[in-house]
Amino acid sequence: MSNILHILNGDSTAYTFEQTGLDGDILVWREILSQGPLQEDISSADFWKAREEWISKAFNDRPEHYQEYVLNPLAKLSEPYEEITLWFEFDLHCQLNMLGVMAMMRKRTDLSAPAIYLVCPCEYPGVADFRGMGELNSDQLEDLYDDRERLNEYEFNLASEAWKLYVSGDDVALEKWIDGNTFWGALRLLKPALQAHLQRVRLNENGLNHIEQKLLDIYKNGIKNKQAIYEDFWKTEKIYGMGDLEIDIYLQRLADKKLIDL
């Protein structure tokens, strides 16, 4: 085992990361905590059982697959690493996964031992319409690593507060907390992501949330092909970091309401 651990948000980044010259073990975080049921205690068996059941049903996957690809790698969080770097992007999908990782580290990792860093880009020089680190090459990832920021107890406390409020489902309390917080430290991209979440949970006069309304508008503008819908959605809503399978969940809701027919 190396004394360095890199926690990567997704396999697309991991593929390129393996081509870098950076030392260390890799833990690929494959959960999507921005969707489905959550509990505050992320280290509990109940939490992961509920996640396994929801993921398996929502994406028509086998529970054994979840155990192998999502749960088993998390054992590395209990190992005595001297340095841990979190690699997460600016969007809601990544920011909530980051909060989950930090919440889990508080439970399973001796935070007094490792130096913990964050790589969290919202843009990259020369890359137009940056959507994530999976778009970058190995040299660019190494550049991001050179500019990483060290996390301290303040950021872990901030993440803990944000996680608790998000899981509670109390959007009024979450909005009040967001507006009342004046310093975000290295977690400065958490604020716009959580604000996007508030848009996602609040319904308009049509009974739709922001994502549903946006997808319905795209459909009404004559775009009826799923891939074309995805592309049009991503043009303005990349803050959500949603893949096509996640967008399909919202499209299905619209179909169930008889608002679209794909």
Image: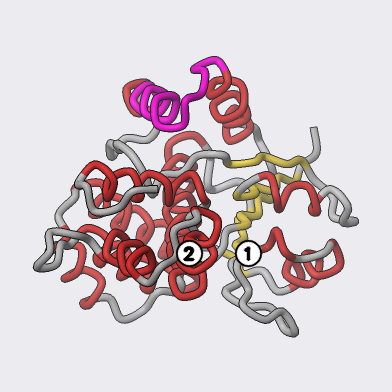
In the image, 256 versus 9, the foreground residue is 256
Magenta span contains residue 83: no
Q: Say which element carries label 1.
A: loop
Which mark is on residue 132?
A: 1
Q: Residue furthest bottom?
A: 126
Q: Is residue 94 above or below residue 67?
A: below
Spot occupied by residue 122 in the image (x, y as percentages of width and height): 57, 74
Tell me which residue sits at (42%, 53%) in the image: 96
* Image side of residue 202 versus residue 240, left or right: left
Q: Main secondary structure of the magenta part?
A: helix
Q: Is residue 90 above or below residue 61?
A: below
In the image, 225 versus 24, the foreground residue is 225
Q: Is residue 152 above or below residue 37?
A: below
Q: Amino acid at mark 1?
A: Gly
* Image side of residue 68 versus residue 174, left or right: right
Location of residue 212 by image quarter: bottom left
In the image, 167 versus 3, the foreground residue is 167
Give neighbour class at mark 1: few <14, some 14-19, many 20+ (Cα, 10 Å).
many
Viewport quadrant of the N terminus: top right
In the image, 191 versus 187, the foreground residue is 191
Tell me which residue sits at (49%, 69%) in the image: 232
Tell me which residue sits at (62%, 60%) in the image: 117
Chain part drawn in magenta: 48-64
Location of residue 147 by image quarter: bottom right
Spot occupied by residue 58 in the image (x, y as percentages of width and height): 40, 31
Magenta span contains residue 56: yes
Query: Residue under circle 2?
Result: 91
